[in-house]
Amino acid sequence: MARKADFNAEEWERVVRGPVLAGLRVIAAHRGGTLRESMSMGRVYAEARREHGESELLDEIVASPPALDPRQLSSPEELQSQTLDGLADAVRILEEKATPEEVDGYRRFVLGLAEHVAQAHKEGGFLGVGGKRISDEEQRAIDEIVATLGGAP
């Protein structure tokens, strides 16, 4: 079983950054609902902390979310690139140091976070009636994330 101590500082930062980048990528995919979607990301982390114990590695990841400087993500294209590169790096690092079950748990956490964020705000409709739970743009972002993670776990 992998733990934070098994990673150097740079590796750990890449691993903990992945879920947040995935959430931000989905938020940036479609205009509207940014506040709800951001709050949703925080709720996913809070819920994961409450479910403490399923995976020691995930417990340590959600206990140390990274601080991201929004100035580092100046455009949607840069965010997309950093997200996909960051997730690919995180999975590669985890595959070297963690068990296959822990890697799948990470993939599930990242994908679950992205989907939760996408569903936080209905797209379209009028006064909350109608609309779609996940916009086409958000679904494309989720599909990119799934492909980068190595497919759906």
Image: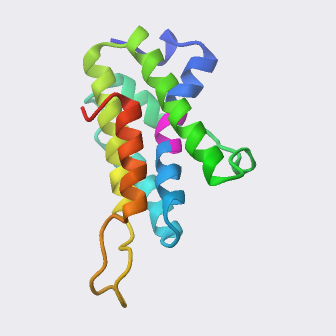
Q: Quadrant of the N terminus?
A: top left
Whole-percent x, y for residue 135 in the image:
37, 66
Q: Magenta stretch: dominant SS?
A: helix
Q: Is residue 57 positioned above or below 74 on the image?
A: above
Q: Which residues are magenta?
A: 17-21
Whole-percent x, y for residue 118 in the image:
38, 59
- Quadrant of res 151: top left
Q: Quadrant of the C terminus?
A: top left
Residue ranking furthest to the right: 71
Q: Is residue 139 positioned above or below 49 on the image?
A: below
Membership of 19 in magenta stretch: yes
Front residue of 91/48: it is: 91
* Count of labels in the image: 0
* Colour convention of the picture: rainbow
- Quadrant of res 131: bottom left
> Is 54 situated left or right of 62 in this image?
left
Q: Which residue shows up at 60% across the image and 46% down it?
A: 79
Membership of 36 in magenta stretch: no
Q: Which residue shows up at 38% across the image and 31% down it?
A: 149
| Residue 127 visible in the current orientation | yes
Whole-percent x, y for residue 101 in the image:
25, 20
Front residue of 115/124: it is: 124
Q: Which residue shows up at 65% across the image and 45% down it?
A: 78
- Quadrant of res 124: bottom left
> Is 8 situated left or right of 97 in this image?
right
> Is 34 situated left or right of 126 in this image?
right
